[in-house]
Image (cartoon, rainbow, N blue to C red):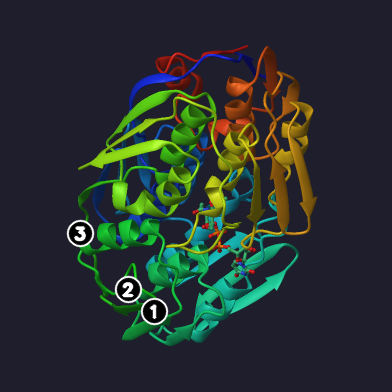
Amino acid sequence: MQKLMIQGGKRLRGEIALQGCKNSALPIIAATLLCGEDCTLLNCPKLTDVYSAARILNCLGCRCSTSGNTVWVDSSEVTEDRIPEELMREMRSSIIFMGAMVGRLGQCTVSVPGGCELGPRPIDMHLAALRKMGVDIREGGGKIVCRTSGERAKGAKISLSFPSVGATENIILCAVTAEGETVINNAAREPEICDLCGFLRACGASISGDGESRIVINGRRDLHGCCYRIMPDRIAGATYLAMTAATRGEIILTDACVPEMEPFLTVLEQTGCSIYTRENRIYLRSGSRLRAVPDRIRTMPHPGFPTDAQAVLMAALAGAEGTSIFEENIFDCRYRHAEALRKMGADIQVLGKVAIVRGVPQLTGASAEATDLRGGAAMAAAALAAEGKSEITRISHIDRGYERFEETVRALGGDIRRE
Ligand code: EPZ
């Protein structure tokens, strides 16, 4: 099992280009099923999750290949309507193929996605929405079997009880080829929703309102192929900024999506970092010890503070002057990284969805096991700021979301290697 060996205490300094966005690439790869032609996706991150999604497309009869940061799909042939359980298990978010398969084939059989490190990951909103669109859904034996009553799903007015990203994506993927109009109220407003809709419009879909709470989709029988560039990864950007801030370094982040990162940048600025932005570049300098964030850091749906940036910011604030308070409102157990940070000397108290982080003058290196994707990145950030050696295992979690992670950190002067 691979691990990361980190010698902390060095200030990160340098310039890196931001990778393509994992949480855009995955639904967009699923969406290529709907085109029935060639699609070329540019700026795709080289991640294990992207390769899992490509394997699912090939298993369904499409031809999908990846070369560098380009994914090429020919979905003219779709010969299967079921995803094998082992492929579903590889990547929890493969449930996103359900909407696309119903949108293309009118039917599909997928496995119930298990829970994950963040807690149970229910899909009740996904299923309720598709049922409203006339999809008959049978659940049993760990399987979900979907079938439209007619040839296609039917447009419907859907109000989500929570602006779920995945549910919004599955509804859009089913609605773009459905019969009639679909309206989604209380839709997720994440930038990745806008990127998915940008791709689908490039394929000829009729979608408006993405990025707001009300999205309107007019179903079209046929879509066509396109060439589309995936947006930058705002969470990877937040990770490298927080990591640099934790080591009192300075960084220029290029190819960044500045407006989409504002919810994170406004909080990071409160730690005393100097942050300047110009076009798609972010410049951060934090020459001294960070300050605790005065206001409670509440994770919320976009445009609130992103839950995916909670762990890395906590790692940066573990060594800050003063006490910061987090409130995790999106996932049931997203503080599993706190234990590893405590092993490095952090003073973190978790009380339900609240975490109290009392900054300590110096963290010290330790051995830790990555608990999940963003928690693993947070451990690396803390290890880079700590004095001494750290060893982080189960780094396959990190490889799911960060392209060339240790090479990127080394490009910033970090003393890190994979063994
Ligand atoms: C997406 O997950 C992202 N994953 C997550 O990123 C991200 O944290 C999350 O959105 C929130 O922004 C991908 O895009 C692949 P949700 P998703 O549906 O779609 C509950 C990362 O680190 N819920 O918005 O699964 C759910 O349990 C990952 O890159 C229901 O109860 O998130 C959670 O508590 C982690 N019923 C909350 O809503 C449902 O039917 C938000 O989930 C659906 C969701």
| Residue 87, image quadrant | top right
Determine contact: label 2, label 1, CB under 8 Å: yes
The residue closer to the viewer here, 417 or 230, is 417
For label 3, the residue is 202
Disc number lying in front (2 or 1) = 2
First in residue order: circle 2 vs circle 3: 2
Query: 348 left or right of 64?
Result: right
Residue 177 shows which numbered tag? 2
Cβ of disc 1 within 8 Å of ligand 1?
no
Q: Above or below — where is 148 with respect to 164?
A: below
Image height of 60 relative to 63, above or below: below
How far apart are labels 3 and 1 at the CA level? 22 Å
Q: Nearer the viewer, residue 29 or 350?
A: 350
What count of labels does the image hold?
A: 3
SS under mark 1: loop
Q: Quadrant of residue 233?
A: top left
Crowding at dot 1, Cα within 10 Å, few <14 / some 14-19 / many 20+, comes out as many
The answer to whether the residues at label 2 and label 3 have Cβ atoms under 8 Å apart is: no
Residue situated in front as seen by the camera: 346 or 307: 346
The residue drawn where x is 42% and y is 49% is: 61
| Residue at disc 2, secondary structure | loop
Q: Amino acid at mark 2?
A: Thr
